[in-house]
């Protein structure tokens, strides 16, 4: 989901920290920085070593400056990798700076600084390309062990396992972030291609509908012009033909536009699956609805209901789960097709339906259906029903 979502049904706000996306607000920035910075608690050994007074003043100042630079570079690498990653050259350059600082500080100030190599392995695993991370993480652990042989082999041996485990675990996190970013780009590309295809289809249909009619109107207009003023009766027949062709073209265009404007339930179900997945909502959507015998007007009304419900879930609810069910039921009024959309979001405000639900209720009533929407125990539920069979013709009784 986005970093901030506001539910207009009850005025509450649900916030999520998106994976692989830069923060969109100051609060997102703070939470993401806290999530990354909390791991700096393991730098307590170098800090205690500096505060213990076991080094000269020059060594303490130099160590403090080196530690500050190390932390700044580490946070820059890992934080940027969670949103807008650095270019590969910059990543390798910053990784080299971390490696040099960790080596120099651990060699000159003692075994308390070996923990910097764990952060080095984390930075390598999270930010480097996969192939580079596979050799960079073990290389950082090996350098740490070799340095530890001079100061504290036992501590170095324990930290080697930790550096390898966390470093390789972070390669998975880094790969997940990169995959998420690529998926978002792919979804945007698919949506763009679908829009272009729809425009091309509309252009083809309009050409097929109007090309012949407009050509015929042009031809008959030229004929009528040549027949005037010598043959007014024949010119009048051509004008009558022009009127008939233009009226038929207008009817064809209206039917075509009505077909474009009327949504189909199967298409809306597929669109709902994509929209919910893009919003990082775990979705349960039926794949192949049974619409046999359902009138077009009733199907269209259910499609509008599904679109409105999914829009509310994505934009306003703050939910992370949504279930869409489509069932046939037998009622006293006959068979109905029932659409249920239920999420675990914050639900409605209890101050009455909004404009969207009011308009949806009117649309369903025109199709002979009903709408119920409101809070449930664990979220919000919308139930729309339409007749599953055409309305019977009422004769005069003659």
Image (tube, grey):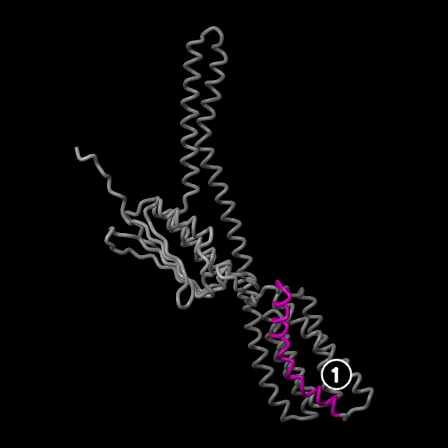
Residue 70, given in percent of the width and then of the height, sits at 71, 78
Residue 276 point in image, percent of width and height: 46, 59
Q: Which residues are magenta?
A: 24-52
Question: Relative to 335, is 259 above or below?
Answer: above
Percent x, y for residue 197? 49, 45
Does 38 lie within the magenta span? yes
Instruction: Note whether 292 is above or below 66 in the view shown.
Output: above
Dividing the image into 4 quarters, which one contains the C terminus?
A: top left
* Camera-side residue of 375 and 29: 375
Question: Within the image, what quadrant is residue 391 found in?
Answer: top left
Residue 290 visible in the snapshot: yes
In the rendered image, the residue lying farthest to the top is 230
Per the image, label 1 sits on a secondary structure element best described as: helix
Q: Is residue 195 left or right of residue 362?
A: right
Which residue is denoted by mark 1 in the rendering?
104
Considering the whole magenta stretch, tell me its main secondary structure: helix
Which residue is at the far left?
398
Question: Which is nearer the eye, 105 or 278?
Answer: 278
Q: Residue 76 in the image: state x and y as whole percent.
A: 68, 71
Q: Residue at x 25, y 51 (%)?
A: 333
- Image: 136 above or below 263: below
Give yes or no for residue 122 being in the magenta stretch.
Answer: no
The residue drawn where x is 70% and y is 72% is 94
């Amino acid at each position: 989901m986005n970093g901030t979502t506001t539910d207009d049904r009850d005025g509450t706000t649900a916030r999520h920290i998106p994976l692989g996306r830069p923060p969109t607000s100051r609060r997102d920035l703070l939470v993401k920085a806290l999530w990354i910075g909390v791991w700096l608690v393991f730098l307590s050994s170098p800090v205690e070593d500096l505060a213990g007074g076991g080094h000269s003043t020059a060594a303490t100042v130099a160590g403090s400056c080196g530690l500050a630079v190390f932390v700044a570079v580490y946070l820059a690498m890992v934080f940027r990798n969670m949103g807008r990653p650095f270019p590969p050259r910059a990543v390798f350059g910053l990784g080299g700076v971390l490696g040099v600082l960790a080596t120099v500080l651990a060699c000159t100030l003692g075994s308390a600084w070996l923990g910097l190599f764990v952060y080095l392995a984390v930075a390598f695993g999270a930010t480097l390309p996969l192939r580079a991370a596979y050799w960079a993480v073990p290389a950082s652990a090996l350098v740490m062990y070799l340095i530890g042989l001079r100061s504290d082999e036992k501590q170095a041996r324990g930290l080697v396992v930790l550096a390898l485990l966390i470093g390789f675990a972070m390669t998975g996190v880094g790969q997940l972030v990169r995959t998420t970013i690529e998926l978002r780009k792919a979804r945007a590309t698919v949506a763009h291609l679908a829009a272009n295809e729809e425009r091309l289809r509309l252009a083809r249909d309009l050409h097929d509908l109007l090309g012949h009619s407009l050509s015929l109107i042009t031809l008959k207009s030229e004929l009528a012009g040549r027949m005037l003023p010598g043959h007014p009766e024949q010119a009048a027949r051509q004008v009558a033909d022009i009127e008939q062709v233009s009226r038929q073209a207008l009817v064809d265009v209206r039917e075509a536009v009505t077909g474009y404007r009327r949504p189909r339930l199967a298409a809306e179900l597929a669109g709902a699956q994509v929209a919910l997945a893009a919003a990082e909502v775990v979705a349960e959507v039926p794949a192949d609805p049974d619409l046999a015998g359902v009138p077009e007007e009733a199907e269209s009304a259910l499609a509008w209901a599904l679109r409105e419900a999914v829009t509310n879930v994505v934009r306003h609810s703050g939910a992370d789960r949504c279930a869409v069910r489509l069932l046939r039921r037998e009622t006293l009024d006959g068979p109905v097709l029932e659409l249920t959309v239920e999420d675990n979001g914050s639900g409605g405000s209890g101050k009455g339906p909004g404009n969207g639900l009011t308009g949806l209720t009117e649309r369903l009533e025109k199709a002979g259906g009903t709408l119920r929407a409101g809070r449930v125990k664990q979220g919000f539920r919308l139930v729309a029903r339409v007749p599953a069979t055409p309305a019977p013709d009422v004769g005069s009784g003659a």
